[in-house]
Amino acid sequence: MRKLLLVTAVSCAVTLVAAPAGAGEQDDQAIADAAVLELSDLPEGWESEPSDDLGEESGVEECRRLDRVNQAAIEQAYAETPLFSDPDDPEGRTTIEGAVFVFPKVKGAERYLAAYKADSATDCFQEIGDQQVEDYPSSEVGTADLQVDAGDDAVGLRLEIEGTDEEGVTDAVVLDFVIVRLGRAVVSLGAQAGEEPPSLDDPMTTVLERLEQEL
């Protein structure tokens, strides 16, 4: 039986060698580090492992705008979570991960969010899904907007992927991706599972509360 590859949240970027941080940048880094989602913020029993998704380029034509804003974002202060996983899922598909970006000015955060609110972001997610199932005889990929009411501005996207192999066995992955801007900072969180991903409401609220205290 085939297995769909795990789909990582589209918050990837080209690895850069950062210049030494100035005093303001050091303060912003402290803000990002203090606010980012931690294992203790999730239900008891969840596990974590290192993640470096922010050092990867998508390689997808439709994702060029998202790649560009993420490249710009990691030139600023940011903190990335590990990959958090639910041990109750024997296939290891139930996960949460994300990042906090702190920009020098509000305009930088607005520009980042705008890229994910554009139609091209939906096209990016759709193409990623299509690539996941291109070898399946039968497949279905769909995207949908998520209602997000948090911070100063926000956007949410869902990607649903389903593929059926030659033996008639169907496999599926669902990814929710939420980005919230609070002032000059941005929080991005992604959750995925074989069926319904874990809710990002509580993790996002926790990070935003810390971020509000730090900004």
Image (tube, rainbow, N blue to C red):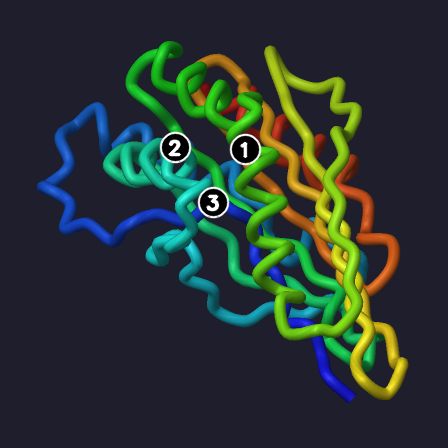
Instruction: Tell me: 21 left or right of 198.
Output: left
Q: Which mark is residue 170?
A: none
1 or 3: tag closer to the N-terminus: 3
Determine the image quadrant of residue 140: bottom right
Give the residue at mark 3: 11
Cα separation between marks 1 and 3: 11 Å
Q: Earlier in the sequence, mark 2 or mark 1?
A: 2
The answer to whether residue 109 is visible is yes
Using the numbered discs, state the Cα–Cα distance from disc 3 to disc 2 in whole angstroms: 11 Å
Residue 19 x, y percent position in the rendering: 10, 41
Q: Which residue is mark 1?
A: 121
Determine whether 69 is above or below 3 in the image.
above
Judging by the rendered image, the residue that carries numbered circle 2 is 65
Element class at badge 3: loop
Alpha carbon separation for disc pair 2 and 1: 8 Å
Q: Where is 197 relative to 1, above or below?
A: above
Q: Which residue corresponds to the image point at 69% horizontal and 61% vertical from the top-left?
A: 95
In the image, which is nearer the foreground, mark 1 or mark 3? 1
Instruction: Tell me which numbered mark, 3 or 2, is placed earlier along the sequence.
Output: 3
- Left or right of 72 in this view: 209: right
Give the mark toward the camera: 3 or 2: 2
Q: Could you say which is closer to the camera, residue 154 or residue 169? A: 169
Name above or below for residue 1 compared with residue 191. below
Residue placed most toward the observer, 190 or 211: 190
**Amino acid type, callout 2:** Arg
Three-letter amino acid code at the position of disc 3: Ser
